[in-house]
């Protein structure tokens, strides 16, 4: 009898405690989140530095080893194949071993295999090392996206996502600077040296992430490591000078029985049932397709522009790659502003519509290049717009890919959506080369992407609105917590 009374008292005490998302809201945004953004969000910086270099040195590699155009595209494709596999592995890996561990491992792998790429003696070894570079890039991204929403108050999640994804642009700027120093025309690049220098940002982040990046408190709670989670939250409170209050929280429903004894197979099985269940199946498919088109419009063009710009611009093609990378920063800012002031679906439709328009403008200008200064201007405006608008999509779509899933399936759900995008990034170079070979012009590639954007525009309404919603710990709570907070006092529309 006494035992039952004690159990009832303990349960009542648990119910009186706030949930972890409520504790995060009380701690607020500050130095703790900024430190996490630098140490963990730099997976995007490493991604940008590596991918621009890999795309830009393709011709130099092909000339050294006398490779066909299709093989050039295939070499870049293997990188995105690796990213795809890394994204898929990051989901269950991050849920089983920890988000932080995936990020640290990602940095280490990028450094090691980028250096091995630069030492490759033939195309076979280069393909293998590049695949592994991609695998380690992909390993860190879903893990960071999960941490970013789990440690950030709801009102700042978009700013956190946009700010860290802006690091991708800085990585591109770093690589573009290396290209300008090596050869502004992009015609005689020293690709081995460039690949080694491109790994420096990842090397720096290895040490910062090991010593400064904290584990996700949400992950610790779900693994039954309650005291460790409280310690992490308390360190956030101290860093943010949030005041003197208890950061103890109500245990999530799934933490006690499952704990760390979950096998990888049972974990994946349970998460798959949540992700592909009746509530989330259609939103998951639509977000995957949205990620597919987002990555095709960005990474397909990332591969295309180093090939196309020398034909359209007499001098300074490498300088235009730098300017294009800088144009992504306003896109990140615009995406962040729209995420803070608009609903997710409204912002997504805005970015998709303008991306299609800029694609068509670039096609018109390039097809008539040299006839009149208006068409030359159209080339530049279209190019800058194509570089800028996908960044709005990266902020909004990737945020939705995190917010629609409960904590127990968030990393895996996000990884699955990102994998949909990585399929497009993987196929982008091959699609470009094949469309050029079949049609005789690269303009057809940009027209194909514009058509895909139009289709994507009509599918966005199938995604639930998540702006301002508190994150749910368990899929049973999704219906209660996924109602978005009205923006600017407006009524939320169904």
Image: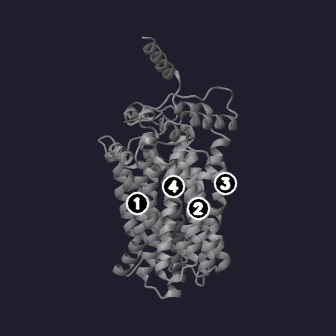
Q: Is residue 104 above or below residue 376?
A: above
How crowded pointer 4 is (Cα within 10 Å; few <14, some 14-19, many 20+) is rated as: many
| Viewer-nearest of discs 4 and 2 | 2
Say if residue 356 shows up in the picture: no
Task: Look at discs 3 and 4 and give the one toward the viewer.
Answer: 3
Q: Which residue is mark 3?
A: 208
**Marks 3/1: CA distance?**
34 Å
Sequence-first disc among 2 and 1: 2
Q: Position of residue 7 (x, y in %)?
A: 45, 18
Depth check: 185 or 71 in front?
71
Which residue is under mark 1?
A: 293
Residue where numbered disc 2 is placed:
108
Q: Secondary structure at mark 4?
A: helix
Q: Secondary structure at mark 2?
A: helix
Can you give x and y, in whole percent of width and height, for residue 273 in the image? 32, 44
Return the disc, 2 or 3, that comes first in the chain's sequence.
Answer: 2
Return the residue nearer the eye: 295 or 237: 237
Residue picked out by circle 4: 141
Name the foreground residue: 222 vs 153. Answer: 222
Residue occupying the point 66% across, 37% down: 235
Residue at (46% x, 52% y) in the render: 93
Contact? badges 4 and 2 (CB < 8 Å): no
- Image quarter of the C terminus: top left
Q: Is residue 9 left or right of residue 181?
A: left
Position of residue 482 relative to residue 161, above or below, is above
Q: Position of residue 271 (x, y in %)?
A: 37, 45
Q: What is the spatial separation of the Cα atoms under label 4 and label 1, in whole angstroms?
A: 18 Å
How many marks do you count on the picture? 4
**Residue drawn at (54%, 29%) of the image:** 249
Q: Earlier in the sequence, mark 4 or mark 1?
A: 4
Q: CA distance from mark 4 to mark 2?
A: 14 Å
Crowding at dot 1, Cα within 10 Å, few <14 / some 14-19 / many 20+, comes out as many
């Amino acid at each position: 009898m006494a035992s039952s009374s004690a159990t009832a008292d303990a349960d009542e005490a648990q119910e009186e405690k706030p949930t972890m998302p409520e504790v995060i809201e009380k701690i607020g945004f500050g130095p703790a989140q900024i430190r996490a953004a630098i140490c963990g969000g730099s997976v995007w910086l490493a991604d940008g530095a590596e991918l621009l270099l890999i795309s830009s040195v393709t011709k130099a590699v092909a000339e050294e080893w006398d490779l066909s155009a299709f093989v050039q595209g295939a070499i870049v494709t293997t990188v995105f194949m690796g990213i795809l596999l890394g994204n898929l592995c990051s989901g269950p890996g991050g849920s089983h071993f920890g988000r932080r561990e995936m990020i640290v491992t990602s940095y280490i792998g990028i450094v090691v295999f980028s250096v091995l790429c630069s030492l490759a003696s033939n195309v076979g070894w280069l393909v293998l090392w590049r695949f592994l570079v991609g695998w380690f890039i992909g390993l860190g991204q879903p893990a960071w996206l999960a941490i970013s929403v789990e440690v950030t108050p709801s009102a700042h999640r978009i700013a956190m996502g946009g700010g860290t994804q802006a690091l991708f642009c800085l990585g591109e700027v770093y690589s573009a600077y290396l290209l300008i120093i090596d050869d502004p025309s992009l015609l005689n690049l020293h690709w081995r040296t460039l690949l080694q220098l491109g790994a420096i940002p990842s090397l720096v982040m290895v040490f910062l992430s090991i010593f400064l990046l904290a584990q996700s408190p949400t992950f610790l709670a779900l693994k039954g490591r309650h005291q460790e989670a409280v310690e992490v939250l308390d360190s956030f409170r101290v860093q943010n000078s949030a005041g003197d209050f208890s950061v103890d929280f109500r245990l999530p429903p799934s933490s006690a029985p499952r704990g760390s004894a979950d096998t990888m197979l049972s974990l994946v099985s349970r998460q798959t049932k949540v992700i592909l269940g009746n509530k989330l199946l259609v939103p998951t498919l639509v977000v995957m397709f949205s990620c597919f088109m987002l990555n095709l419009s960005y990474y397909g063009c990332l591969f295309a522009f180093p090939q196309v710009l020398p034909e359209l611009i007499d001098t300074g093609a490498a300088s235009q790659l730098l300017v294009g990378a800088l144009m992504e920063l306003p896109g990140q800012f615009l995406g962040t502003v729209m995420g803070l002031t608009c609903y997710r679906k409204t912002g997504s439709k805005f970015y998709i519509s303008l991306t299609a328009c800029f694609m068509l403008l670039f096609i018109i200008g390039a097809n008539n290049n040299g006839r009149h200064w208006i068409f030359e201007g159209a080339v530049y405006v279209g190019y800058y717009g194509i570089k800028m608008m996908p960044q709005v999509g990266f902020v909004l779509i990737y945020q939705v890919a995190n917010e629609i899933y409960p904590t127990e399936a968030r990393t895996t759900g996000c990884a699955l959506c990102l994998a949909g995008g990585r399929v497009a990034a993987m196929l982008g170079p091959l699609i470009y080369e094949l469309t050029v070979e079949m049609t005789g012009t690269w303009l057809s590639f940009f027209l194909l992407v514009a058509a895909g954007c139009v289709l994507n525009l009509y599918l966005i309404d199938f995604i639930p609105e998540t702006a301002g919603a508190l994150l749910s710990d368990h899929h049973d709570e999704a219906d209660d917590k996924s109602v978005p907070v009205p923006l600017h006092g407006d009524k939320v529309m169904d």
